[in-house]
Amino acid sequence: MSQPMDQQASGAGRGEPAQRRRRPLGRRDLLALVSLGLGGIGAAIIGVPFIGVLVAPLLRPEPGQWRTVGNADSFAIGSTTAVTFLDSSPLAWAGPAANTAAWLRRVGESEFEAFAVNCTHLGCPVRWIATANLFMCPCHGGVFYANGQVAAGPPQHPLVQYPVRVVAGEVQIQTSAVPIE
Amino acid sequence: MDGWLRPAKAVWLWFDERTGFSKPLDTALKHPVPPETADLKRGGWIYLEGVGTLTAFIIQVITGIALATLYIPSTANAYDSLQFITNSATLGSVLRGMHYFGASAMVLFIGLHMLRTFLTGSFKFPRELNWLSGVVLLIVTLIMAFTGQILRWDQDGVWSLVIAVEQAGRIPVIGTWIGRYLLAGKTFGATTLSRMFAYHVFFFPAIIFLVVGLHLYLVLHNGISELPRSSEPVDKKTYRQRYHERLARTGVPYFPDAAWHEIAFGVLMIIGIIILAAVVGPPKLGAPPDPANIQAQPRPDWYFLWYFALLALMRPSFENFFVILGPLVFFLVLFLIPFVAGSGQRSPIRRPWAPAIAVATVIIIGGFWRYGSVAPWSPRFEAQPLNAKQIGASSGPVYDGAQVFYNKGCEFCHTVDGQGGERGPDLTHVFQRLPVTTITGIIASGRGNMPAYVNNLTPQEMNDILAFLQAQNNASH
């Protein structure tokens, strides 16, 4: 049997200051708290898959895969070539988004260097100017020497290098995360 | 006339009996507004930028929904679906154009609206919440503009996202995680685009709907701000009473006295946007979005060009702080304006800081914007080598020097005889400005934003370049 509303008031008359509640938690107060609490629990339960799907890709371990980019002998010694390879675990509908590029240089018989194409300033793809022996970025004027060291412009770090190896005459680059500062 | 009117009225009465809608509708439409806001000649025109922003948003929602019936947010198909929309779908090109110009209009008008409410002190009591909700809307609008360009998913879109990720990466400690959150993984992948689509189409529009709802409710609740008078600063104790007294004496109903010219402006805007969409057309789709395509020249859409310029010109040591703290501090300052600005005076004449800040902001952003559209700091990879006539020789050291000048990439950053890049100074008359020893030293060891060429030039090539530049200086250009 619910109490009428005026009996809930603590008896403050006109002109008297409102009295602080001194009696124990009434039924309505308990119901209000339960409503809020249950609502909070419901929101939290919905929130788990919502937040989970947003955050999961960051936490999933992605071991680097070795990708073949060509026959070692197809690269002249001293040349720097752009190569493309697939990311470590592309989804079926990824299309071109699954590609990563690198600048591959053959240094010796079976010695190779692979540079990430991302300029270390803000990530734009750097171009290799063969006649100038320089990497140049189109965005803000960053320039790198052939060894990846910063030559000019806003970048503060040398170009990131990917692990590269030669296995059975084939050059392989290891997939990595996009280099972020 | 009676024929259809009576049954229509009967339907409405049946509906209204059960919903009670006529009462709030009447309040909203007929509520009194200060008379000058309804009079274009007395200054009412300054309120039009508010309805301009709202109209732009409505255009975006409607054209956006239409585009979503054709667009495929999959990294493998997005580009093709956009080609289809632009080239094959009936009125698809117009739709894309409206969505692009609508976005431009929205960014432009939200800036104008912010300027106007700042200058007229409309953010002061009792409308502080209007300003605060407006700042939230500004942030979300910029996010929508950014994610929108990414959804175009061409070369520019893909690399814009990489740049945003790199900037996020500058945040200390959690930067890399935030960057990966934006990418939806450790590299670009299929889910990168679908995530941006969900943000742009569902998540942020939901926020806009909610906050715009609050924003418009507040305009009704607190009343539209009257034109400020320097003799009547806001007094919190008496403002509401005086406002309502004034309305009772001289107020005019919002609809149709003030509403008609707001609707007219909205319609003009719609017509303008559709004409632009049909005549100028949507932004041309760049190259397909392959992160392995290295011949990219990423550029943000026009409304971010000023920020692009700012990043290019900033000192590298300062950049880390600015990229993160800059936007934070800027928006924090915006949020604090109602609390730190004086609470009374609204007229811009008596608040000289307000017009000064407004003018300074417009000039600074305008200057960076102009600079960003020219982008002199980007190497001009498309520059062509000088021909024999420009070189003034077809063989010998001067001619060879010109070839070295092009092959070593000098021309990408330096102009000679009106051709080349603007990253570095014009070198046509450099021999007039500097002695040959200085020029040689700069080429060899670099300077400022120029790399050192000491390991990249043979002594013969160095002499050839000097001969070439000397000849350029001597020739009468």
Image (cartoon, coloured by chain):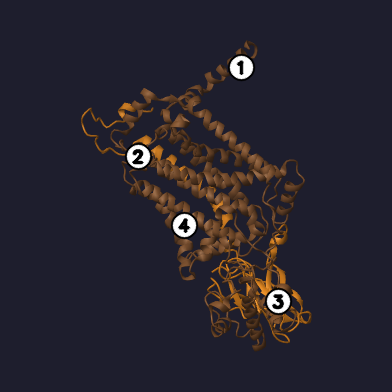
The answer to whether B335 appears left or right of B236 in the picture is: right
Residue occupying image coordinates x 63% and y 12%:
B1
Label 3 and label 1 in one chain: yes
Q: Residue B379, position in %: x, y?
A: 62, 68
Q: Nearer the viewer, mark 3 or mark 1?
A: 3
The answer for how far apart the CA atoms under marks 4 and 2 are is 26 Å
Residue to which mark 3 is pinned: B392
The answer for how far apart the CA atoms under marks 3 and 1 are is 86 Å
Label 4 and label 2 in one chain: yes
In primary-sequence order, the first of circles 2 and 3 is: 2
The answer to whether B105 appears left or right of A31 in the picture is: right
Q: Residue A61, position in %: x, y?
A: 60, 67
Residue to which mark 2 is pinned: B125
- Residue at the top extreme? B2
Residue B8 disc label: 1
Q: Residue B110, position in %: x, y?
A: 50, 45
- Residue at the left extreme? A16
The answer for how far apart the CA atoms under marks 2 and 3 are is 72 Å
Mark 2 secondary-structure assignment: loop
The answer for how far apart the CA atoms under marks 3 and 4 are is 51 Å
In primary-sequence order, the first of circles 4 and 1 is: 1
Identify by letter the chain in brown: B
Residue occupying image coordinates x 58% and y 53%:
B302
From the viewer's side, name the closer residue of B392 and B5: B392
